[in-house]
Amino acid sequence: MVRSLLLTVRQLINVYLFLCFIKILLSWVPSAAYSSFGRMLSSICDPYLNWFRRFRFTRIGMVDFSPVLSLGILSIAAQLITSLLTTGTISLWGLCVSIIELVWSFIGFMLNLLIIFLIIRLGYDLFGSSSSSPFWYNLDRFLSPVIAKVTGFFPQKPLQYRTRLILTILIIILLRIALGLLVGSLLFQFKVIRII
């Protein structure tokens, strides 16, 4: 009885996770978001998704990463139920590992996205013409604080913009690799300790 109830709850969480994901994708296409299907999904998913929009740390400039956090929380809930179904208990250790995985997936996603944006900006700087498009203006507004922080560690000689971009890309790639190795080894050790 309890097992079938937990299976049903886990399936409902997975369906809701999928619906929220579709809603997030539809929000990028205004004509789809305001269709009857989009409005129906909004009525189902927005109360949950909007709850996470109030956290400031999920916003960088005009970009809102709160959907990543909200989907991660649903994923952890489904993981905990799966753990409860397989072992019969929910361990504090397993919960800590799940939270570390969620935080790392969020940070890793942000670093990967930042690397992609920086490479796009470098490509435009190398091969693009001088355009005053709003896209490039907004991209520069998003990247400028990051570039300033990362290159602020270097001597105060004025660096060319392209040099600062390349340095920022290299440092963030190294940071991503180092953190990935650190978190990966920590999670591996946590799982080994959990087995022992």
Image: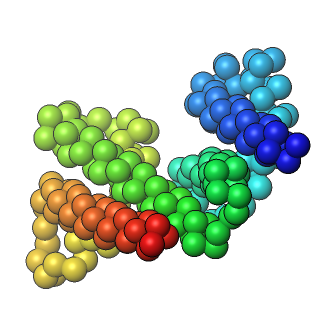
Scheme of colours in the image: rainbow
Residue at the location (77% across, 19% down)?
37
Image quarter where the C terminus lies is bottom left
Residue 68 x/y as whole percent = 57, 49
> Is residue 88 something that shows in the picture?
yes
Residue that extends furthest to the right in the rendered view of this protein: 1
63 sits to left or right of 16: left
- Residue placed most toward the observer, 55 or 159: 55
Q: Is residue 47 above or below residue 144?
A: above
85 sits to left or right of 190: right
Residue at the location (64% across, 69% down)?
91
- Residue placed most toward the observer, 186 or 107: 186
Image quarter where the N terminus lies is top right
Residue 174 x/y as whole percent = 21, 63
Q: Is residue 156 above or below residue 87?
A: below
> Is residue 70 something that shows in the picture?
no
